[in-house]
Each structure stands twice: as C-alpha cells, then as structure tokens.
Image (tube, rainbow, N blue to C red):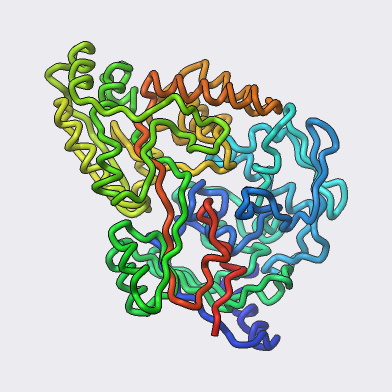
C-alpha cells in the first residue's frame, strides 16, 4: 500500500528535480482546520477549502457565479434528464494512478452514501462511464441544478481508497480520514490535526496554465481571533481568515498588510429543538423568541456592522429571497406571545454554540441568551471549539443550537434541503435540521423546486417556503455573515477569493 507520507516524499523529490523555479512558501492560518482529509465526511466550509487544494472538482464556481471547467473540460445536456461530462485526458492522481471516468462514477456513488452529501445528490439516479473520458449523469426529472451539484464532485482515486479503505466514518478514524490521493495542486505531506498541516505542490498537476507559484503551503489553525490577527501583523503568517470585525481597520491601516472584504451569503441561525423541549413545539413560543432577539443590535454592536440583518434564509439576489419579510424585534410582543402560549413564567432551555466556527459565534449566543432572559427563558449556554461542537450538533445535544449555512449550490433550495426539510436519514434531507422542524408543505414545495425549470414558477415556490418558515418561526435567522481576509502585501489573495469562501490557493501568486 502506498502511504500518504510515501506519496508526499516522492512529490518533494520531484519538485526539486523538476526545477520549478523559486520555491514560494505560504504560511496561512484559519480559525480551525478540517475535521478530516476525507472530502465526503463533513459537509463544511473547512472540508471544501481542503478539497480545492488536494482534490479538484469537475467544474468550479467563478467570481461571476458561473462555471469554469476543471477535471471536466466540457459538458452537454443530452435531454431534460441527461447530462454528459467530457473529462480531461492524461490527468493523474497523487498516487500516480490515472484518473478515468470510473473514478468519477465511483466518487459519485460514494457521495450518494455519505450522510452529509447524499441529500445534494438524491436527484442523481445514475452515473455511468461511457468510456474512459465520458461520464453520463441521469436525474430523476428535469433538474435546474446539475451543474451546481457537479461543483461538489471531487474525483477520488478509486484504486487507492479501495486498497487502503474507503469507509466513510463520521468523526472517526478511517484510512480516508488520514490519507488522500486527489488530482489537486497540493499533496498533503504531513498533518497533525489541530496543530499543523503541510502541503507540497503536486509536480504532476494537470493545470499547467495555472499562475500559482506556491510550492509549500503550511496551515496553522489559530482559534483565537486576536492571536490570528497578531500573527499576521507580526509577519508570522502570510494569510489569515476570518478577520474579526474588531480588527478590520488594524489590518487595513497597517503598513505591509491588506484587507479584502466581500458581502457574504452565509446565514447564521439558531435552531429550536421541538423534540427535546416541548415549549418549542408551540409556534407562538418560537415566534416569541424571534421577536425577543434583536438582530439589528447584534449586527451593530457585536458584528460592528460587518453583517446584514436577516429575516429569512435566502439573501438578496437568490431566487427564493422574499422582499416582504422583514426582521422583527418587539419585546412586548414577545412577552404577549409567551403568555398566550401559557409560558408567562418562562422555562429553562439549554443552548450550545461553537466558539471558533463563525465570526463572533459565542458572543452572539451570549447576547441571544441575555435577550431571552427578558421573556423569562433561562438559558444554560455551553460553547466549545468546532471540532467538539459538530459531534454534539449531530447528537442534537442541546435544545438550541447554532448553525451557519452557505448554500452549497448558490441556490435557495439548498437551505431548505438541509436546514428545514423534515429530517430523513435515508435521503439525507434535513441532515442539519437540529430543530426537528417539519412541515409537509415546505417539503413538497422544496422538492418541486428541484425539478421546476421555469424560473418564475420556481421563484414563487421558494419565496412561499420562506414565508411559511417566517410565519411559523421554524428557526431564528440572525444575519448574513460578511467575509474578510487579511494578507501581507505581495500575497495576491484578491485573485483567488470568492463569495463561497473557497480560496483557490492552487492559483495563488506570491510576488517576489
């Protein structure tokens, strides 16, 4: 069996032997590192950031939210339910194995078995290798989102994983969680989770037109935002994310560093578990909570204005955005709803939140807990690092849990599929619905939107869903989180950043 370190050592040798020019090293710090090297274990931003470094998608988003060819050099729609992708010839995995259509089909079949990803791929009824470079996808009906979904197909090395172990283990210890063979610009040389991951440039990378000149990339997760910012200002790292709102000006005004910001589309929410706490099964109580939490105050005081107050999941510009829905904050109204529901004297509830996943996440939860005290909901709040939080989230370990979501398909339906549809372990839908909210009409409209190709009809469906969720206070929308990155001068991050927050570091240029 070829081990990860064997592959990395060979890669380092070839980098030196090939004479690829001045070796540029990128030292970068995120607030956490991926929970695993398995691209199918956790549907999260950290996993997808890693996947764009070590693997390569069939196609990927560009800054205009269009699609650029990657491992698929072209595609064509054969009919309403059939799409064909033509793969690049001559692409090899880090192991040296050639990438073929069989690897792509195997990857898609594995995605359909992943607890986190199978909901996205539920409509893909088959994937077939017509020859070594042609993959045919069939959907269960007309689909407006085949290309959106294809951005999450990062072909894996079938022979490598079948030899070492292809099992998907959530929060576990598996071959795939510790070893990787992709086609991406970087090979994982070494990894100590939570401490440091070292990536070396893939000497056989297929994209010879890439301008990227980073030969070594070293990820050091730094959970604490002040420490992360200090590391950049001191020159200890070259690139950091995220930048907290309190430090935007420090990086922008500092000689030798630069700040890049972008309006975000990630919704930050609190989910209310109707099965753990019977009070949350009453929509009047959920509405009271929505009225009690001052979203605008959170954005102004905690986010320092670096966010957009929300009343729904879909941000402006998404097809499901409903302009009739506005944020609500009225403590008197909240108190009246509590009394109407029979909870004038309040009740107790537990809350869990991460403290290094979203910008100011634990501070937001502390503020929400204080606001809920005004309607006599006594909150027992626990915060923890992301690595510990996600297993607790999967357990539904508290009455109220925080989750942020960036639509995986840049489409409104994706919010519903994962956050508000009735949880279904078989299909994967509702995978991140820790509130156990269920409304047959929401499910029906969401599923219909996945096969509706008329833009106006589809928008009407998804906007109706947002109205239902709003009226029933299915969850508590807080704000859309803006994006900010910091880097030293000469590290051209602005060229590789996007609203999805998947920096394409394989294309990063560091100027001399």
Measured as percent of width and height from the top left, residue 76 is found at: 82, 44
The quarter holding residue 405 reads top left
Depicted 35 relative to depicted 339: above or below: below
Measured as percent of width and height from the top left, residue 286 is found at: 30, 23
Measured as percent of width and height from the top left, residue 99 is found at: 76, 60
Q: Is residue 151 left or right of residue 480?
A: right
Q: Is residue 94 left or right of residue 339?
A: right
Measured as percent of width and height from the top left, residue 314 is found at: 49, 34
Residue at 14 percent across and 16 percent down: it is 344
Depicted 78 relative to depicted 207: above or below: above
Q: Is residue 348 left or right of residue 490?
A: left
The quarter holding residue 296 reads top left
Using the image as rendered, state which of residue 256 and residue 149 is in the foreground.
256
Depicted 300 relative to depicted 95: above or below: above
Tell me, yes or no, if residue 6 can be seen here.
Answer: no
Tell me, yes or no, if residue 432 can be seen here.
Answer: yes
Q: Quadrant of the N terminus?
A: bottom right
């Amino acid at each position: 069996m070829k081990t990860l370190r064997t592959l990395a050592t060979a890669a380092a040798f070839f980098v030196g032997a090939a004479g690829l020019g001045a070796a540029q090293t990128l030292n970068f710090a995120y607030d956490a590192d991926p929970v695993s090297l398995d691209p199918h274990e956790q549907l999260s931003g950290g996993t997808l950031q890693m996947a764009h470094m070590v693997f390569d998608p069939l196609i990927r988003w560009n800054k205009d939210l269009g699609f650029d060819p990657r491992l698929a050099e072209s595609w064509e729609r054969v009919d309403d339910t059939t799409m064909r992708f033509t793969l690049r010839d001559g692409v090899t995995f880090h192991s040296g194995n050639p990438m073929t259509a069989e690897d792509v089909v195997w990857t898609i079949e594995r995605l359909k078995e992943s607890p986190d990803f199978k909901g996205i791929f539920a409509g893909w009824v088959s994937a077939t290798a017509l020859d070594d470079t042609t993959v045919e996808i069939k959907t269960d009906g007309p689909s407006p989102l085949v290309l959106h979904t294809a951005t999450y197909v990062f072909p894996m090395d079938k022979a490598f994983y079948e030899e070492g172990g292809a099992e998907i283990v959530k929060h576990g210890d598996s071959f795939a969680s510790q070893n990787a063979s992709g086609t991406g610009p970087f090979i994982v040389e070494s990894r100590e989770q939570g401490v440091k991951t070292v990536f070396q440039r893939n000497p056989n990378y297929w994209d010879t037109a890439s301008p990227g000149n980073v030969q070594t990339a070293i990820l050091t997760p730094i959970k604490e935002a002040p420490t992360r910012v200090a590391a950049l200002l001191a020159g200890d790292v070259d690139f950091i994310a995220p930048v907290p709102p309190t430090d935007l000006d420090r990086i922008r005004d500092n000689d030798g560093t630069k700040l890049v910001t972008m309006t975000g589309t990630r919704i930050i929410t609190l989910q209310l578990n109707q099965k753990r706490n019977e009070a949350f099964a009453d929509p009047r109580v959920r509405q009271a909570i929505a009225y009690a939490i001052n979203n605008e105050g959170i954005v102004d005081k905690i986010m320092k204005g670096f966010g957009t107050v929300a009343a729904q999941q879909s941000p402006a510009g998404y097809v499901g955005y409903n302009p009739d829905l506005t944020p609500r904050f009225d403590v008197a109204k909240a108190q009246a709803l509590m009394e109407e529901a029979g909870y004038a004297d309040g009740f107790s509830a537990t809350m869990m939140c991460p403290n290094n996943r979203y910008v100011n996440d634990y501070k937001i939860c502390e503020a929400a807990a204080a606001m809920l005290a005004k309607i006599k909901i006594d909150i027992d709040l626990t915060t923890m690092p992301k690595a510990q939080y996600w297993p607790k989230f999967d357990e539904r370990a508290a009455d109220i849990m925080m989750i942020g979501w960036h639509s995986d398909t840049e489409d409104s339906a994706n919010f519903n599929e994962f956050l508000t549809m009735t949880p279904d372990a078989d299909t994967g839908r509702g995978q991140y619905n820790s509130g156990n909210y269920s409304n047959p009409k929401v499910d029906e409209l969401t599923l219909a939107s996945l096969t509706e190709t008329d833009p106006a009809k589809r928008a009407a469906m998804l906007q109706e869903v947002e109205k239902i969720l709003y009226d029933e206070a299915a969850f508590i929308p807080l704000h859309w989180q803006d994006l900010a990155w910091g880097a030293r001068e000469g590290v051209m991050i602005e060229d590789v950043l996007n609203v999805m927050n998947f920096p394409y570091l394989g294309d990063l240029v560091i100027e001399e």
